[in-house]
Amino acid sequence: MKKLFALITFAAVLNFSYAPVVVAQEDTTKTEAVEASAEEAAEAAPAEASTDIEEAEEAPQSFHQTLKTKFIEGGAGFMGVVLLVLILGLALCIERIIYLSLATGNSDKLLGEIESSLKSGGVEAAKEVCRNTKGPVASIFYQGLNRKDEGLDMVEKSIVSFGSVQMGLLEKGLSWISLCIALAPMLGFMGTVIGMIDAFDAIEIAGDISPSLVAGGIKVALLTTVFGLIVAMILQVFYNYLIAKVDSLVNDMEGASITFMDILVKSSK
């Protein structure tokens, strides 16, 4: 019995003495695993960060951001002047588009109303129709009706003279738009020449031709030319539209004037 108790006591002592060793070994294993995971995470973090940076650098910029960046790189001096030319040119174009749109009318309808008014109410009724109608054609007809008592020759001369005045009003401001079209690329070329001079001055001061220095100066110099050409192209599209609109209105006035004279000849008989 004593031997059995002694064996049990010895086994218990061995068990308790072995348990801390196992626990210690398990703790050591866990610690090593945690440290290894931390090292792997630390090694992976820079790689992920560098990947994120590369993705951010490779992400394409929008057109607005690219345009803004290039505008700033070109310098505030000439780039600001070119931008001012664009704003002034667009303002003139918008004003002309509105004016020509208001000047456009239905000449056939106006001629029909004038013809019926001459038959029913005479010259005064036809004048009232012209006064109530907007546009250069109605103004020309009104001037012709004012000279009807002086003969058809005076009516024709009045229509031709006042038609020239109305044509001048339609073409008003187009010369300034043409000036903006010519001025924008000229300013761009001037900015390029001045930028090249600055680049050569920097080379002279540095005493050495550095590729980065030369390339950077030339790039900044050429940006003014690029923006000047873009401004000229934009304004040229509007200018051609306005010229076509004026030509259309002038042709309409000439055709309507011929029909108007025929109506007056018929009403005089």
Image (spheres, rainbow, N blue to C red):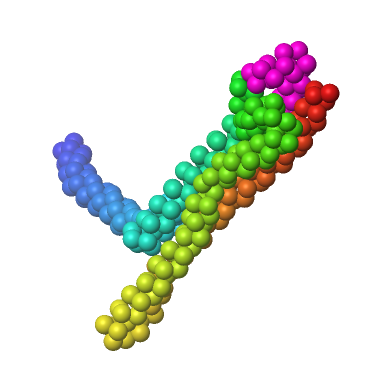
Q: Which residue ends up furthest to the bottom in the rendered image?
A: 207
Residue 198: x percent and y percent? 33, 75
Relative vertical location of residue 126 with respect to residue 237 in this rendering, above or below: above
Seen at 69% across and 35% down, the residue is 154
Image quadrant in which you'd find residue 78: bottom left
Image quadrant in which you'd find residue 136: top right
Magenta segment, prevailing SS (helix, strand or loop): helix
**Which quarter of the rendered picture does the N terminus lie within?**
top left
Seen at 80% across and 24% down, the residue is 268
Seen at 35% across and 84% down, the residue is 209
Image quadrant in which you'd find residue 56: bottom left
**Which quarter of the rendered picture does the C terminus lie within?**
top right
Q: Nearer the viewer, residue 233 or 113?
A: 113
Tell me, yes or no, if residue 245 can be seen here.
no
Q: How many marks?
A: 0
Q: Nearer the viewer, residue 7 or 195?
A: 195
Q: Which residue ends up furthest to the front in the rendered image?
A: 150
Residue 5: x percent and y percent? 18, 38
Tell me, yes or no, if residue 118 can be seen here.
yes
Q: From which residue to which does the magenta span run?
A: 107-129
Residue 157: x percent and y percent? 68, 39
- Is 128 included in the stretch rendered in magenta? yes
- Is 191 included in the stretch rendered in magenta? no
Q: Nearer the viewer, residue 76 or 89?
A: 89
Seen at 63% across and 48% down, the residue is 243
Residue 172: x percent and y percent? 53, 45
